[in-house]
Image (cartoon, coloured by chain):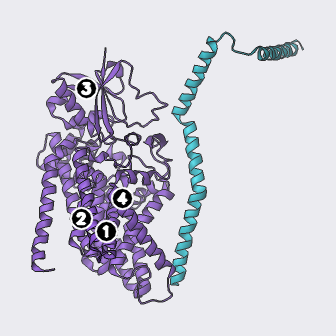
């Protein structure tokens, strides 16, 4: 890399990040609040109160208790009943809320959303570093992170500090894991353990990292023959992970061992979960028995097509390589059995995490809902193998100028397509569907599961009917009353949400979220005296509808 | 040792996959069907259907075919006479 490149690359990178940050932060308040924001706030306050009580901070304990009482919602779960839920963002944010005396509920949520997005952006920098170490090609890796950030559903969810927050910490963990493949040093081992524990705090899926790390060391040992050293390294790492898992989770501060086992119970009892019906491909299924194709279908219909094709070819290409390596195993060799270089070891780790995770989900019959949001972190590997494939093709066609240029055009097209989709779906990027499926098909899957359209709905009615007071019924499983917190107090007081009491309602809000089979159960049927007066339709996807009482 | 390790892993993975894609899938399919049939909505739908059929039947001039009516009458008469006999004894 010459001096010119050394200067312009960081400038170019900073410029891209500045544009993304400004564009995102200028428009993120339009996203509305999702139905679980209230719960997350309560969760943060609950654990802050717990800590305040342990350390005898009376004032803090009093304030948190007062705030918790103020969060009145009969539909909300009690954090004490779900003590396993991650607190890595909820708790610090509850602390910030108290320290900075944030009173306006919208501001509390927006602060949380902006911090969640900034963590996602920081994690994308780690993803860039991870890619650059692997592929050593600035423009390819730049394209990789732009595709990573602009994946429509991931971008939309990056404000919602749930699944994408896990993705963010997972990618940072992976970065340090990849560093360890180059050099097993103490610093990276320590940071890998810290971020692994943080990821684990959000989702226990992060337990895959220690398993894959162990497999990696075992396989590496076959060539290096340093079993004692690797055993020592793994023991230190494992101890650190356990230590930080306990440290980051106040739930584990008492009855540590039994509570830790309790965290793994969802995996053991994966087939037992909340038995609700979910709309999938036009049919209602119990979430315990979704079709085998559920995950693959969702990824297929919500991932931009160019990225998806590149990923599929990249993955197949690697699988072929992996099988070849496996078939040609030798009793003794001067190289590692399943990889030949540090770069290849990273491909192997990515392949192993992705494949073993997907198979585990299938074998344990994991209950799914809301598309593939629970496993959005798989997008890391989708982009990784897409970039891997672009790299393969550019090596393959390095001497054919036209093909090389064609590859650049395809990559730029993929980015432009993502950016256009982000603009088209704004502020509902979380509900993006690929253009390859028909509009009818788009509406035969769950839509607005976060209830983000609530804000749009209240603002729309307020605008159309100039501050009149209305009773709103809800023909959906969405707890719409929680969305009232996304609008200003003046607007909020004009609406009363009355559940499914349709006959006393002035308007009905409907989105296609139902916990029952709505073809058999009529609880969300719109009564005959209501007429549709509005429908928010984005690219063929019906986000929500408004029905007016014609009495 | 190394080859044994790889072979063991391969056999283990193939075994798990074979079980899953044979018995596992059949079990899941059956469970799904049972869950669908016994779900609250399905039972409610069945009840609704039954009510609907009864309503349609009531509105008809004749619910039964003449031959069926004769058979049922003879059957009920027979049962009745047997019941009377048993009480007289």
For the residues bearing labels 1 and 2, Cβ distance under 8 angstroms: yes
- How much space separates mark 1 and mark 3, taking CA atoms? 54 Å
- Where disc 1 sits, the SS reads helix
Q: Earlier in the sequence, mark 1 or mark 4?
A: 4
- How much space separates mark 3 and mark 4, taking CA atoms? 44 Å
Task: Tell me residue A288's x, y (percent).
Answer: 49, 47
Q: Label 2, on which residue? A: A143
For the residues bearing labels 1 and 4, Cβ distance under 8 angstroms: no
The part of the image, by quadrant, that contains residue A184 is bottom left
* Residue A525 shown left or right of residue A289 in the figure: left
Residue that appears at 26% across and 73% down: A401
- How much space separates mark 1 and mark 4, taking CA atoms? 12 Å
Q: Label 1, on which residue? A: A390
Apparent colour of chain B = cyan
Q: Label 4, on which residue? A: A308
- Residues tagged by mark 1 and mark 4 found on one chain of the structure: yes
Q: Is residue A433 above or below residue A403?
A: above
- Where disc 3 sits, the SS reads strand
Of the numbered discs in the image, which one, if any, rests on residue A496? Answer: 3
For the residues bearing labels 3 and 2, Cβ distance under 8 angstroms: no
Is residue A548 among what the camera can see?
yes
Q: Earlier in the sequence, mark 4 or mark 2?
A: 2
Task: Tell me residue B50's x, y (percent).
Answer: 60, 23
Task: Tell me residue A160's x, y (percent).
Answer: 26, 49
- How much space separates mark 3 and mark 2, taking CA atoms? 47 Å
């Amino acid at each position: 890399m010459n001096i010119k490149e050394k200067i312009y690359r960081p400038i170019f990178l900073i410029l891209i990040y500045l544009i993304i940050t400004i564009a995102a932060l200028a428009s993120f308040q339009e996203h509305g609040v999702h139905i679980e924001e209230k719960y997350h706030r309560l969760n943060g306050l609950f654990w802050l109160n717990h800590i305040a009580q342990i350390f005898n901070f009376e004032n803090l304990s009093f304030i948190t208790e007062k705030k918790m009482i103020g969060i009145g919602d009969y539909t909300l779960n009690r954090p004490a009943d779900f003590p396993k839920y991650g607190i890595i963002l909820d708790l610090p944010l509850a602390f910030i809320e108290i320290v900075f005396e944030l009173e306006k509920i919208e501001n509390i949520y927006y602060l949380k959303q902006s911090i969640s997005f900034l963590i996602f952006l920081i994690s994308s920098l780690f993803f860039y570093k991870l890619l650059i170490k692997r592929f050593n090609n600035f423009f390819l890796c730049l394209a990789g992170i732009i595709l990573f950030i602009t994946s429509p559903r991931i971008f939309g969810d990056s404000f919602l500090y749930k699944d994408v927050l896990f993705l963010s910490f997972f990618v940072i963990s992976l970065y340090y894991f990849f560093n360890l493949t180059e050099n097993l040093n103490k610093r990276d081992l320590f940071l890998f353990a810290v971020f692994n524990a943080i990821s684990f705090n959000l989702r226990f899926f992060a337990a895959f990292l220690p398993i894959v790390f162990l497999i990696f060391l075992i396989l590496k040992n076959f060539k290096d023959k340093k079993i004692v050293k690797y055993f020592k390294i793994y023991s230190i790492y494992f101890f650190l992970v356990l230590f930080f898992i306990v440290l980051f989770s106040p739930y584990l501060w008492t009855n540590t061992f039994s509570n830790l086992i309790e965290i793994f119970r969802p995996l053991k009892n994966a087939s037992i979960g909340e038995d609700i019906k979910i709309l999938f491909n036009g049919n209602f299924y119990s979430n315990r028995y979704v079709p085998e194709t559920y995950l693959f279908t969702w990824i297929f219909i919500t991932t931009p097509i160019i990225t998806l094709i590149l990923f599929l070819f990249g993955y197949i290409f690697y699988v072929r390589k992996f099988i070849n390596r496996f078939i040609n195993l030798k009793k003794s060799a001067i190289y590692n059995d399943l990889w030949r270089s540090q770069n290849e070891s990273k491909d192997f780790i990515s392949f192993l995490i992705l494949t073993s995770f997907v198979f585990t989900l299938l074998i344990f019959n994991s209950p799914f809902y809301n598309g593939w949001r629970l496993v959005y972190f798989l997008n890391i590997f989708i982009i990784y193998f897409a970039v891997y494939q672009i790299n393969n093709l550019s090596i393959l066609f390095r001497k054919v100028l036209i093909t090389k240029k064609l590859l650049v055009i395809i990559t730029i097209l993929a980015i432009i397509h993502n950016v256009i989709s982000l603009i088209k779906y704004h502020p509902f990027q979380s509900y993006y569907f690929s253009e390859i499926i028909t509009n009818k098909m788009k509406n035969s899957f769950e839509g607005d599961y976060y209830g983000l359209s609530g804000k749009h709905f209240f603002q729309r009615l307020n605008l159309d009917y100039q501050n009149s007071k209305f009773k709103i019924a809800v023909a959906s499983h969405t707890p719409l009353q929680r969305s009232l917190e996304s609008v200003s107090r003046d607007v909020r007081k004009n609406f009363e949400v009355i559940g499914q009491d349709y006959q006393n309602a002035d308007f009905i809000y409907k989105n296609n979220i139902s916990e029952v089979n709505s073809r058999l159960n009529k609880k969300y049927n719109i009564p005959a005296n209501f007429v549709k007066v509005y429908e928010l339709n984005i690219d063929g996807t019906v986000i929500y509808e408004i029905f007016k009482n014609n009495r | 040792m190394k080859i044994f390790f790889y072979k063991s892993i391969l056999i283990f993975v193939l075994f798990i996959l074979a079980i899953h894609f044979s018995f596992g899938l059949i079990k899941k399919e059956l469970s799904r069907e049972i869950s669908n049939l016994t779900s609250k909505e399905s039972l409610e739908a069945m009840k609704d259907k039954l009510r609907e059929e009864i309503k349609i039947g009531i509105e008809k001039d004749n619910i039964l075919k003449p031959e069926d009516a004769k058979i049922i009458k003879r059957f009920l008469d027979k049962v009745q006479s047997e019941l009377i006999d048993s009480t007289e004894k």
